[in-house]
Image (spheres, coloured by chain):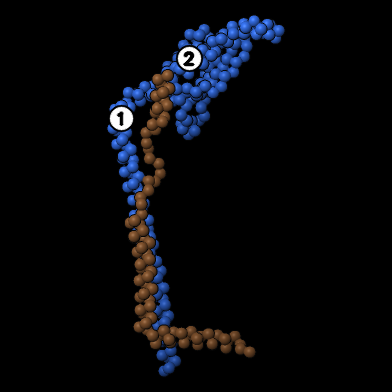
Chain colours: A blue, B brown
């Protein structure tokens, strides 16, 4: 009889522990996780609201000033070249060079491929000119002050009149180097419309 | 010298004694457990409700905004 009661007690303890474990694993633990997740969602929602209202304020400020910007923005837009049709820019390069009595040759350099090319904000042009050395500065000035947004990256100048070294020195001494015939190659970044 | 079985029996009898004392003071034990539960509940309420409500919202990520500096520099380039 006594042994039977002891067994009953052990069974009761076992069942109690089992029920407690089941409650802990299937009720208390998920409930705690839900509370934690809900709290994080509330914080994240508050942050989203703050971000959206900041963005809204920024947009409203811009909308107020937009009328004063619009005319200049259109002009600024024209500073960038159309990557699909850069003919007018190439014409500008050629005309600028021809005006200074250069013989120009314009090359559009490949700007990579795939995603890197689509993310680029510029294309690289190369213009080779043949003409008088004194006009090079003028050409650079005219290109930079032109109606396009460009950045000259590299200039290579070499003589094209095949003078012997001693004749070159003579020219330098007499200041005649300015009229020398040279061949210059300019690489430039031309910023494009997106 | 006690054998391993004797040591196990001693430990078991102490555990039984511990639970026996708990059983004798069941009412006090329930009060203590309730107090601990209130503490845990209070902590969770503070940690996940009050702190979350008092949280000062912060702007996440980047906001798209008009770049006034770029606009002005382009404008000055245009007016040259």
Image coordinates for residue A70, horizontal then vertical, percent = 32, 26
Q: Marks 2 and 1, how far apart in space?
A: 32 Å
Q: Residues within 10 Å of mark 1 (few under 14, many from 20)?
A: few
Identified at 33% across, 46% down, the residue is: A50
Rendering quarter of residue B32: bottom left
Q: Quadrant of the C terminus of chain A?
A: top left
User: Which residue in the protein does label 2 denote?
Assistant: A142
| Mark 2 or mark 1, earlier in chain | 1
Image coordinates for residue A8, horizontal then vertical, percent = 41, 87
User: Which residue in the protein does label 1 denote?
Assistant: A66
Labels 2 and 1 in the same subunit? yes
A53 sits left or right of A13 in the view: left
Q: Residues within 10 Å of mark 2 (few under 14, many from 20)?
A: some
Q: Secondary structure at mark 2?
A: helix
Nearest the eye: A145 or A97: A145
**Residue A193 seen from this side:** no
Q: Secondary structure at mark 1?
A: helix
The image shows residue A142, relative to residue B69, as above or below, that is above
A106 sits left or right of A82 in the view: right
Image coordinates for residue A176, horizontal then vertical, percent = 62, 6
Image coordinates for residue A83, horizontal then vertical, percent = 44, 24
Rendering quarter of residue B3: bottom right
**Residue A117 seen from this side:** yes
Nearest the eye: A28 or B46: B46
Identified at 52% across, 29% down, the residue is: A112
Name the outermost residue toward the right. Answer: A166
The image shows residue A164, relative to residue B77, as above or below, that is above
The image shows residue B41, relative to residue B24, as above or below, that is above
Q: Quadrant of the N terminus of chain A?
A: bottom left
Q: Subunit of mark 1?
A: A
Identified at 41% across, 76% down, the residue is: A18
Q: Subunit of mark 2?
A: A
């Amino acid at each position: 009889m006594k042994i039977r009661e002891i067994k009953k007690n052990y069974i009761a303890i076992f069942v109690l522990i089992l029920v407690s474990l089941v409650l802990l694993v299937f009720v208390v633990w998920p409930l705690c996780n839900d509370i934690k997740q809900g709290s994080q969602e509330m914080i994240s929602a508050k942050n989203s609201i703050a971000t959206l209202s900041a963005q809204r304020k920024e947009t409203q400020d811009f909308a107020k000033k937009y009328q004063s910007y619009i005319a200049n923005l259109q002009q600024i837009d024209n500073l960038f070249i159309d990557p699909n049709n850069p003919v007018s820019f190439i014409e500008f390069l050629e005309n600028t060079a021809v005006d200074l009595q250069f013989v120009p040759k314009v090359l559009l350099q490949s700007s990579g491929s795939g995603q890197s090319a689509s993310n680029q904000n510029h294309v690289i042009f190369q213009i080779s000119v043949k003409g008088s050395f004194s006009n090079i500065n003028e050409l650079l000035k005219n290109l930079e002050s032109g109606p396009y947004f460009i950045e000259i990256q590299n200039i290579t100048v070499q003589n094209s009149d095949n003078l012997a070294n001693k004749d070159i020195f003579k020219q330098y001494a007499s200041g005649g180097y300015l009229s020398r015939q040279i061949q210059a190659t300019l690489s430039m970044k031309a910023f494009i419309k997106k | 010298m006690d054998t391993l079985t004797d040591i196990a029996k001693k430990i078991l009898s102490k555990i039984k004694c511990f639970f026996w004392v708990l059983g004798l003071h069941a009412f006090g034990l329930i009060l203590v457990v309730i107090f601990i539960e209130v503490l845990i509940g209070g902590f969770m309420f503070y940690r996940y409700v009050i702190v979350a409500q008092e949280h000062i919202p912060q702007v996440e990520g980047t906001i798209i905004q008009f770049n006034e500096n770029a606009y002005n520099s382009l404008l000055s380039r245009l007016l040259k």
